[in-house]
Structures are given as C-alpha cells and as structure tokens.
Image (cartoon, rainbow, N blue to C red):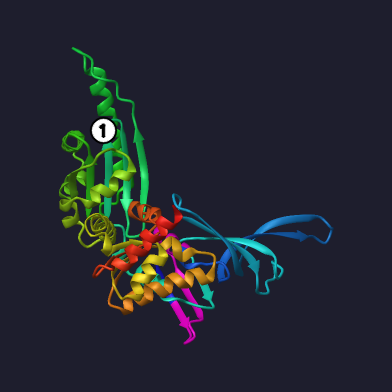
Amino acid sequence: MKLLRKDIEKDNAGQVTLVPEEPEDMWHTYNLVQVGDSLRASTIRKVQTESSTGSVGSNRVRTTLTLCVEAIDFDSQACQLRVKGTNIQENEYVKMGAYHTIELEPNRQFTLAKKQWDSVVLERIEQACDPAWSADVAAVVMQEGLAHICLVTPSMTLTRAKVEVTIPRKRRGNCSQHDRALERFYEQVVQAIQRHIHFDVVKCILVASPGFVREQFCDYMFQQAVKTDNKLLLENRSKFLQVHASSGHKYSLKEVLCDPTVASRLSDTKAAGEVKALDDFYKMLQHEPDRAFYGLKQVEKANEAMAIDTLLISDELFRHQDVATRSRYVRLVDSVKENAGTVRIFSSLHVSGEQLSQLTGVAAILRFPVPELSDQEDDSSSDDD
C-alpha cells in the first residue's frame, strides 16, 4: 500500500489518499472503510445517451465519484472489494443521491474521508504502508490424498490451492495402483507449489503432515527436480522446512505455527507472534486462571485495575456498525497501551483469529492475579443456575 496524501485535523477529522498495490492491501482497505465514510475513486458507469434522431443508446464511461458509504462487500479469496453508497458530489453522469457501487482496484488510487480517525485505523495504515509486512511464509499442509497450499501473510491465511486425489489401499502382493496414485498426487502438489508460491518473496516453506508423508513427498520432489534440472526448486531447497501436523486440513496450520522449530524460523513474522500469544493465553487459562480473562466486561474491569499485560483482540470488532461499540474497543486498546501493555490485533482471516473470535474476540493475559474478577464470574454463573 502506498500513502500519497494524509490530511488529518486536530479534531481527528480528515482524509487520506492511498494506492493499493497488492491483493492483501484490499483486506487492509476493507478494515479502513466504514459505513458513513466518504470514498472518492475512479469507477465505470453505464450511461444512456440520446442521439439527435431520438434513438437511445448506452455506453460505459470512466468517471470519478464521491460516495457516502452504505455497504461494504469483501471477497477474501479473490481479494476484491466493492463499496456501495450514494453520490454526494456533483457529476455530469451521475445525479446527486443516486446509488453506485465502486469496485476498488489495485494500483488505482482512492481518497477516504472520515469524521473521526481513531488510533486503530491510523496504525493499520502505518502497517499496510510498511513493506516489511508482506507475505513471507508459505505452507503445504498434507496427508495422503489431500494437500492445502497456503500463504501466511501478516494479515491473513490464504488458501491458494487444494489438491485431492483418491489413493487406493495397498493390497497384499500388489501395491502398484497405490504407488501410481501417490506419485500422481505428489506431482500435482509440486505443480501447485510452483504455480502459487513466489520464491523470491517467501522466506520459508513449511511442509507439514502426519507420519512420513512429508519426508516421502520432499524426497520425490527433489528427485524429480534433479531429473528435470528444475533450478527453481533446487536453488530454494534450503527454504523447505519439514514439520509434524495432525492432518492435511487447513486448521492444522495453527499447531504447525506453534512448533518451536517453526517459531525460531518465523520469529520475525506477525503470524507467529499471534499464534504464540494465543498459546500463552490458553496455558495461562489452564495453570493460572486468575491471570487470564476473556469477554469485554471482564477485560475492561481488568484494565481498570491496570492489570493487563497483553491484550488479544480481533480486527472483526473494529468493523462493528455501531459507532459507540467500536469506540469502546478503541478506548480499550488506547488505555492498555497507555498502561504499558502490549496489544495484539488478530486478523479474523487467520486461523488464530478464528479461534479468538470463538472466545468473544477479546481476551487478556494479566500481569498479576485479579481473584475478585474470578469471584464475580463464579457468582454470576451461580446466579444463572
């Protein structure tokens, strides 16, 4: 993402002009645009024209519109963002108040104006414009007959390809069908890796599976690379890291990112930091429940006691339609930072973010136990009974 212009007044009203450069920038934009904002961008509009003879025709024209945002639609797989709203600025093709949907496109600038820019939104712009926040981890999570090729970016886990091949069982005295199917499966996975992983960007490629599937696959891949003189795979051999996973499904990625050998290789990526923070929270909840809380009311009370060491919060909560509710989460984040706490904003498109959303989307690891909060929790649950 490129920041072209930033005009924000002392009362936090103002506008920014940005250019999304990569598909992931659309995800950042989705988290920046909110209902009630004003969005100015280039778009295509179908316009009806009437000739001097009275015949009516229509043609598509490119024009620049300013909309008051009413609805936002994001397609996470295609990384496409559509913003619907009413026109609020005079235009020769579109009447004032007329509805239009702008599809934001990569490498085409847009200007976003808000009445109130909060700290969370401004921090996201800072992160999106920082080149170090690009996708640098890929993962191949596999089992016999099933593989997922994923890109782990700082903001989301993108499934780039799913390979499924039916593998017949081994029969006594005849394994040829099983072996042929397995070879066909491995070949399809190798092709998917070459098609979807940019080796010049990716620092590490995790190959995860139960049993010996990963070892057999890597042996096959590099034997074939030597036979066919595939320089791309041979030059990047050191980037492949084999780790254990319980299955070939996407959810196994969380346990893969928790693996200590993986964590040391990915120590500088945000994704690994999120997974570690969530892992620490679960451990604390198990061993010292007085120092781990989730749910907005409980976390706010812990914050009042200045007890929060690490706040875990889902970015989904900042997309809340109700301004007062959204402001409440922003105040919580600002307050924790003021009290020298760490704030980790989880992406709802990451496996770790999905898990945090199941815990209400907000949780905290405390500096010291706050037993009164636990007692209140117990009292409220006994009252319910």
Q: Which residues are magenta?
A: 5-30
Identify the residue at horizontal 34%, vertical 70% (top origin): 302
Q: Residue furthest top?
A: 173
Percent from the top left, x then y, of residue 42?
A: 56, 66
Q: Residue furthest bottom?
A: 10
Identify the residue at horizontal 27%, vertical 47% (top origin): 139
Which quadrant of the structure image shows residue 269? Answer: bottom left
Residue 65 visible at all: no
In the image, taking residue 133 as reference, residue 107 lies left or right, namely: right
Image height of 263 relative to 368, above or below: above
Q: Which residue matches tag 1?
A: 186
Identify the residue at horizontal 45%, vertical 66% (top origin): 318
Percent from the top left, x then y, of residue 233?
A: 21, 44
Residue 334 visible at all: yes
Percent from the top left, x then y, of residue 198?
A: 29, 51
Q: Is residue 9 magenta?
A: yes
Q: Is residue 264 magenta?
A: no
In the image, taking residue 308 as reference, residue 42 lies left or right, namely: right
| Nearer to us in this view, 268 or 341 | 341
Q: Amino acid at mark 1?
A: Tyr
